[in-house]
Image: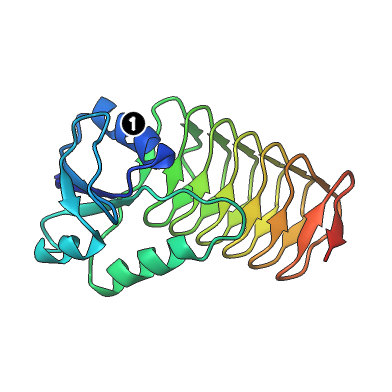
Amino acid sequence: MNKPIIILGNGGHASVLTEILLSQNRNIIGFTAPKKEENQFGIPYLGNDEKILKYDSKEVELVLGIGSVGVNDFRRKIFELFINEDYTFVNVIHPSAILAPSVKLGQGVQIMAGAIIQTNTIIDDNTIVNTGSKIDHDCEIGAHVHLAPGTTLSGGVKIGNGTHVGTGASIIQNIRIGNNCLVGAGAVVIHDINHDVKAVGVPAKEVR
C-alpha cells in the first residue's frame, strides 16, 4: 500500500517530482525547506528536514527533491542521513518513461519524462535519469548519479557512484566511467574515464 509522502526541497526539481506524484494520485503531506516558503501546488510547509524525524519511518515515504548540478555530494549526504534513520525513499517514474521489464532499480531512483531504459540495465540508489535520457541494454549506473537531460548511453556502459553526466552528453558502448566524475555537457566519451576526473569536449578529454 502506498504511504503518505514527504518531499525534501521546494525548488524546480522538487516541482517536477511533485507534479509526477500528483498525477499518480499520491498523497503528499508536505515538503521541507530551510525556511518557510510557498508551494505552487498548495503542498504544506512542514519545516526544515529535522521535522521529518517526528514522523514514524514506517508510516511515511520520502522523495528527495533537491536537484544536482555537477558533482554534488549534498544529495548523497541527505539520502544517507535518512536511510540511517530507517526511512525509505520512493522511486518516482514519469508515466511517459519507457522501462524494459528486466530493468532493476535501487531505492529513491527518479526517472523523468521521455526517458528510455533498455534491457538488463541496473540503476542504483538515489540516481536521477533526467528528461529524455536514453540508456541502452546492459548498462550499470551507480548510486547518487545524475544523468542530465538528453544524455545517451550505448550498451554496456558502467558509471560509478556520484558521477554527473552533463546535458546532451553521449557515451559509446562498453565505456567505464569512475566514481565522482563530471562529464561536460555535449561531451562524446569514447575512452574509459578514471575516478574523480572532469572530462569535456568531442571527443571527451580530461581537464584539470
Secondary structure of residue under mark 1: helix
User: From where the camera sits, is residue 89 visible?
Assistant: yes
Residue 206: x and y, percent?
85, 61
Q: In screen coordinates, is 197 left or right of 74? A: right
Give the residue at the far bottom of this rendering.
84
Number of labels in the image equals 1
Q: Residue at x 22, y 48 (%)?
A: 36
Residue 67: x and y, percent?
46, 48
As shown in the figure, which amino acid type bears the numbered disc 1? Ile
User: From where the camera sits, is residue 2 visible?
Assistant: no
Q: In screen coordinates, is 108 left or right of 30? A: right
Up the image or down, 197 lies above or below 61; here it is below
Toward the viewer: 32 or 108? Answer: 32
Up the image or down, 132 lies above or below 188; here it is above
Within 10 Å of disc 1 (Cα), the crowding (few <14, some 14-19, many 20+) is: some
Determine which residue is flagged by label 1: 20
Toward the viewer: 100 or 50? Answer: 50
Up the image or down, 77 lies above or below 5; here it is below
Toward the viewer: 161 or 154? Answer: 161
Colour treatment of the image: rainbow
Up the image or down, 18 lies above or below 207; here it is above
Residue 142: x and y, percent?
56, 61
Residue 122: x and y, percent?
53, 53
Q: Where the C terminus falls, by quadrant?
A: bottom right
Which image quarter: residue 168?
A: top right
Q: Residue at x 10, y 61 (%)?
A: 55
Q: Where the N terminus falls, by quadrant?
A: top left
Q: In screen coordinates, is 101 left or right of 41? A: right
